[in-house]
Image (spheres, rainbow, N blue to C red):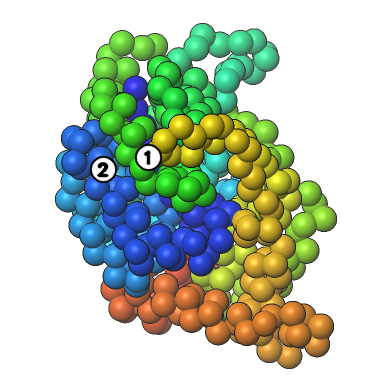
Amino acid sequence: MIDIVNFNGDASCLKRARYLHAIREGEIAQWLGYYEASSRHVSVGMCGVSLIDLFIHKDSASLDLLRSSSYIHTIYRPFVHALSTVMDPSLSCINILLGILVTRTILARTSNYFLPPEFLFRMSDVLTLRKCGVEYTFDISPDTLNHANELLPYSIIRCLVHPSGASIKSINMHQCSTKAYLRCIQIMSEYCGTDNLWRDGESFLFLPDGLKREEMFINQTRHVKSIVSYVQEMSSAELQLELDYYPLRPLSPWIGDHANHWYRQIGNRLLEWIYDDKPITLFMLVLLLMMYSSDLRASASKDDVSFDILPLGGHARLHKFGLKREVRTGYAEALEWLADISIEVFPNDISDSLVNSMNGSANKLTSRIRSYVNLIVDSYPVFRHANTLGAFKKILEDNCSVQLDY
């Protein structure tokens, strides 16, 4: 089995205060350290914003492990956890390129793998990834059909072929043991999963004694393979289907109720600004990408959840543990985002009621985005001279591309 862990900006619906506490108090470093200490392989994909958060909050212990551990394997992610299929193709391309650039800059590592948010991917992104040296992506579709809607033979690795002839391989993760992992850390049961594992790296941050639960799980699963050895084994043993499309899964769990899309209005205004050929800054571009965060959409529409949990120690018994929607990102933080971005980009286009709802959050958000922008510009001063979407894309392509023969 392989273990694929995604770590999203703001830790996938987790309150930002809890997320930053985990960084500053060394919880993420301790979590990563368990893999190194147990010589247990894991493949970690952090969105670009997550890596910058580790950097600007000086979590050197986490970064050192991500940079140098021979057991922690890097997987590229986009800059922002956004669904490419609901974005403008140019923005999707920029989101991928910026994520790759940030990963290479902060970790000084390259990767042959790219994990798309929620396994949603554009075939047009095949060209983008191949130019960056990426050879593999992932999908989670249970069935694959041909043009006659006939079920094709099952294959763990499929070859996605772009009309240009460029191709990328996709590792199917449908038969994965996510539920077995959650049951293991929630009720401290023996891990019984036998398939590949895909999971959210921040799951332990939601639970009491989450680090101890993770340590127990890691110690139970020492048989995990490195992704490199797994791919080599599967490539030699399996039939690899060629597909001219990416096998999609349903969008609805990550789109949310359409009524919750009101906060994207600022993103639409920014797009209009860009398409009217008005000058833009890197600050505005990063803000625009962030407005497409699928975690904002999903958390605004998720219901309260409860599950059985076993407290650690003694003769504890199972009891119900609840996660209320209000402790996730939800409407309140989405409202703050909209208000903050409106003030920053359109200072004369905001209602008094929206201003009154901010509760002083504007400086926090704009300061955070400036930190992202400053790090990027300090590393690549050429960004200072760009003022169009095409110019930003060209800079990213020039700095991410590698020489390929395909």
Whether residue 43 appears in this view of the structure is no
> Relative to residue 101, is residue 121 depicted above or below?
above
Secondary structure category for the residue under label 1: helix
Residue 301: give x, y in percent of width and height. Answer: 73, 50
State the residue in front, 299 or 143.
Answer: 299
Q: How many marks?
A: 2
**For mark 2, what is the residue?**
34
Picture quarter containing residue 361? Answer: bottom right
At x 24%, y 47%, the residue is 33
At x 72%, y 63%, the residue is 331
In the picture, the disc for residue 214 is 1
Q: Are marks 2 and 1 in contact (CB under 8 Å)?
A: yes
In screen coordinates, is 97 left or right of 107? right
Whether residue 28 appears in this view of the structure is yes
At x 65%, y 67%, the residue is 333
In screen coordinates, is 92 left or right of 29? right
Is tag 2's residue or tag 1's residue first in the polypeptide sequence? Answer: 2
In screen coordinates, is 103 left or right of 302? left
In the picture, the disc for residue 311 is none
Residue 192: give x, y in percent of width and height. Answer: 42, 18
